[in-house]
Amino acid sequence: MRILQSEIDRIKRDVSVEQFLVNPKRQGGFLVACCPLPGHDDKTPSFRLNLAEGWWKCFGCGRGGSDVITFACAYWGLSWPHDFPLALERLGARRGNLGEHRYLPPMLKVAPEPTRPVAGPRLPDRVAIDIYRAAAEVWAANLWRPTNRDALAYVRVRGIPDALIRSEWVGVSSDTLGAELRKRDLSPDTAQLLGLLRRDGHETFAGRVTFVEWRLVDGNWAPVWATARVYGEGAAWDAERKYLNVRGDRLVVGLDRCRQAHEVVVVEGVVDRLAILRFGDAAVALGSNQPSPGMYAELRALARAHRLILLGDPDRAGRKGRLRTLATLDLPTAAEVYVADLPPDVGDPGALAERPDGAAIYQTVKQAARQIDLARFGRLVAACHASYESRKAARCARTHAGPMAPIRHRSSLEGGENDGRMTTARAQPT
Ligand SMILES: [Zn+2]
């Protein structure tokens, strides 16, 4: 790819590091913000951008550079000068193939190594991974045994093709893990600590369909987490929780599997995720509508290099959950996020895979997805927050005012929270 010098100049003129900053504040000739670079979980604003000259510097992790292109390399973890064209392309450069003009990248003035770790979830150690691997293999093999016909039937009814069942390691737990661990000389005590075995030696997930999360650990695929779902029918299951997880930190399911994709669909359930994979798209699942702080860190990293489509229920609760996720994510305005609603008669994304017209509905839904104007969204969230804080302050003042105050404050608090929700729901640009 060749890029004209004029195009490089245009990028430097039109694209600013500011677009990658969250809530930047003006201080003299500088914008000050928390460091947006990977590997630095900045709690105090350490990052400075010189508005007149375009150079930037983080006083926390020590990285800095002369312009938006050096910044882009640090932000997307691109190598210099090899990935220089890629950095330009991501910043919106148009390809030019006129003449023989070749551009030699300028010298990089970026300190390469971040000093502080990312606050992502912790992955299990090698011993735990060996145990997860035993579990993943036993469960996957179980699913194809005649005794577990009903579990396989359940997964097939959910519209998941056999090839996907195998490649995504869907399985079923039938209480044979203990024996397998003994065979492999792995510790049942550690398996208990991980939440795979109960104290009585039986499997925690017994009688459930299992889903295993695989991640790249030191360059190799390794099973690092698991969740399991009930699949039987009838009253006996009603008292039980639909999903059980292992004990480790919760993870964004499917994160490493969509590294190659440009666009990633974000859904709630693991079965929803399989449905999207079935339609040929990349997807991650959050497992609930309340991600953990570590999962937010993972989602932020994902939004750095991918377009995200938040797909879910069209009802109020579903939409509110997605907007809450988005507000907590606090993404830089350069991120690309879309929100897509399913039609009211489709319960969740997983239901699409069960319908013959599912693929067509999915395409329609995707085409109707609305891009979120993150700058505007951020301002609305900040306004909501400010209004909530001022109400809280007013409530405190009233509480301390006299003995009758608490009764009045309770009703005004309820009204206040409702108002806040309404404004957040309207924050979505149409
Ligand atoms: Zn930094």
Image (spheres, helix red, strand yellow):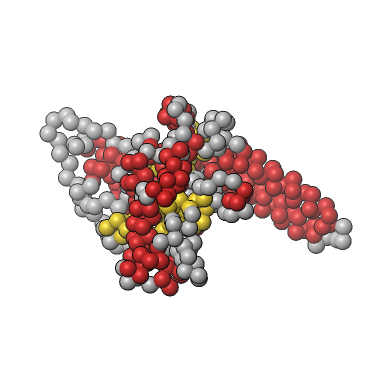
Position in image of residue 245 (x %, y %): 49, 58
Residue positioned 55% across, 51% down in the render: 242
Residue sticking out furthest to the front? 146
Position in image of residue 113 (x %, y %): 29, 62
Q: As displayed, is residue 314 above or below residue 249? A: above
**Residue situated in front as seen by the camera: 346 or 296:** 346
**Residue situated in front as seen by the camera: 313 or 231:** 231
Q: Is residue 359 visible?
A: yes
Residue positioned 62% across, 53% down in the render: 239
**Residue situated in front as seen by the camera: 103 or 246:** 246
Residue positioned 25% across, 43% down in the render: 86
Q: As displayed, is residue 296 above or below residue 320? A: below
**Residue situated in front as seen by the camera: 362 or 399:** 362
Q: Is residue 328 visible?
A: no
Position in image of residue 317 (x %, y %): 61, 42
Q: How many marks?
A: 0
Q: Is residue 100 shown left or right of residue 277?
A: left
Q: Quadrant of residue 177?
A: bottom left
Query: Which quadrant does the N terminus fall into?
Result: top left
Residue positioned 42% across, 46% down in the render: 149
Position in image of residue 328 (x %, y %): 53, 50
